[in-house]
Image (cartoon, grey):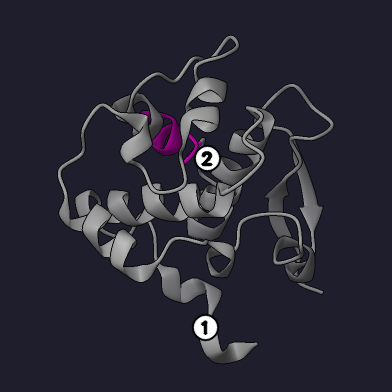
């Protein structure tokens, strides 16, 4: 059995708590899956073509409730630039032995949003931030890693 590294933020206050899981559990009902994004392709294309603004509600999937949740707690996110910064911070930490890859990275961001109390549209938010980031940073996200939409 090949084991993949995944993150369990539910039982830890640290966003870097690790556990090992099988590939099936990573693609389970819980966690990031771009196929669960409820953002229309037209809206996603508009987002990808637009300039980033400070307003969090410009991000597909973020409404007033999510914006409020992001601004709460010790780690307050009050604008899009900070949200992109958090996404990029979760790309690591890398070591000589291993690198945080795309699937693990998006899972960490999904779990962080869950920990912040974002209860809906997490996959949409992750997909929007990841795909927009990929326009700035080549290789940071590849939707093809999750397989073809017609695989189900």
Q: Residue 73's quadrant in the figure?
A: top right
Helix, strand or loop status at disc 2 = loop
Is the Cβ of the residue at disc 1 closer than 8 Å to that at disc 2?
no
Disc number at residue 149? Answer: 1
Can see residue 57? Answer: yes
Q: Is residue 57 rendered magenta in the image?
A: no
Residue at figure coordinates x 39%, y 52% from the top left = 128
Q: Is residue 10 left or right of residue 85?
A: right
Disc number at residue 95? Answer: 2
Rendered position, 20 above or below 68: below
Q: Residue 74's quadrant in the figure?
A: top right
Q: Quadrant of the N terminus?
A: bottom right
Q: Residue furthest top?
A: 74
- The spot of residue 140 in percent (x, y) is 36, 54
Residue at figure coordinates x 84%, y 31% from the top left = 11
Identify which residue, 90 or 122, lies in the foreground.
122
Q: Is residue 129 left or right of residue 104?
A: left
Of badges 1 and 2, the one in the foreground is: 1
Residue at figure coordinates x 75%, y 55% from the top left = 30
Q: Earlier in the sequence, mark 1 or mark 2?
A: 2
Label 1 crowd (10 A; few <14 / some 14-19 / many >=20): few
- The spot of residue 133 in percent (x, y) is 30, 49
Question: What secondary structure prevails in the magenta region?
Answer: helix
Label 2 crowd (10 A; few <14 / some 14-19 / many >=20): few
Rendered position, 99 above or below 35: above
Q: Residue furthest front?
A: 64
Count of labels shown?
A: 2
Q: Which residues are magenta?
A: 85-92
């Amino acid at each position: 059995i090949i084991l993949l590294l995944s993150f369990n933020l539910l039982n830890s206050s640290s966003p870097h708590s690790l556990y090992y899981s099988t590939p099936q559990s990573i693609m389970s009902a819980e966690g990031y899956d771009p196929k669960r994004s409820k953002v229309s392709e037209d809206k996603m294309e508009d987002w990808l073509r637009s300039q980033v603004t400070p307003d969090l509600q410009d991000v597909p999937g973020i409404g007033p409730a999510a914006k409020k949740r992001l601004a709460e707690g010790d780690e307050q996110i009050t604008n899009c630039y900070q949200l992109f910064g958090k996404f990029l911070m979760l790309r690591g930490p890398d070591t000589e032995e291993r690198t945080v890859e795309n699937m693990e990275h998006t899972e960490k961001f999904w779990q962080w949003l869950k920990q912040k109390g974002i209860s809906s549209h997490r996959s949409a938010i992750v997909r929007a931030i990841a795909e927009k980031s990929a326009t700035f940073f080549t290789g940071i996200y590849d939707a093809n890693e999750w397989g073809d939409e017609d695989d189900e």
